[in-house]
Amino acid sequence: ALPSGWKDLANSEVFFPRSRPKRFIHFLGGAFVGVSPRLFYEGFLQDLAEKCEAIVIATPFQLSFDYDAMAEAAAAKFDQTVSRLTAEYPACTDLPVVAVGHSCGALLHALLASAGANYQACVLMSFNNKPISDAIPVPLPDAPRNLQLREFARSNID
């Protein structure tokens, strides 16, 4: 029998609906909240799982400006989670996958879909491909004039 509720599995946050699942939903969140999808999207993901009769696999990711590498890493984590799930719960084998992404997560799913990911459907919410200065609707500070400080700031971004 499948569990219900949240379970951490293979570095992903997984929510099992109370009903028998008919699909997987692979969820990727926004740029700065994608690192902890359950914390920021918990109610939404639980409702989505129950209403869609789906096992939601929320894959955390670290923001980087190499979107292709981020997408590949998220896909690899998702595949590892599905492998563990199907080994532990054979009833989950061969469920179709629906991709759901918010903001940066939508961009990552668009990249994966264009690269041939086998999705039954894609739900892309608030997708944009703007530079960060246009995507964040608040004034950003000027870049540091001190070259050492600028390099330090850049070194903390993957």
Image (spheres, grey):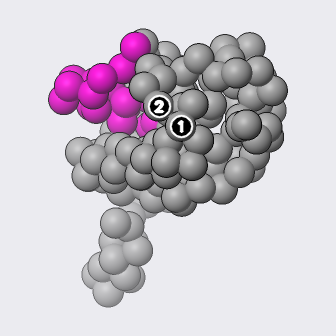
Residue at mark 2: 93
Query: Is 115 one of the magenta-colored residues?
Result: yes
In the picture, which quadrant includes the C terminus?
bottom left
Dot 1: within a 10 Å radius of its alpha carbon, few (fewer than 14), some, or many (20 or more) residues?
few
What's the residue at 47%, 31% (across, down)? 93
Q: Which residues are magenta?
A: 101-120
CB contact under 8 Å: marks 2 and 1: yes
In the picture, which quadrant includes the N terminus?
top right
Per the image, label 2 sits on a secondary structure element best described as loop
Is residue 31 at least partly visible in the picture? Answer: no
Per the image, label 1 sits on a secondary structure element best described as helix
Viewer-closest of 97 and 100:
97
Type of the residue with mark 2: Thr
Residue 4 position (above or below residue 32): above
Question: In this rendering, would 39 be left or right of 36?
Answer: right
What's the residue at 79%, 37% (across, down)? 4
Residue projecting furthest to the left: 115
- Measured from the top left, where is residue 96 in percent x and y? 44, 20
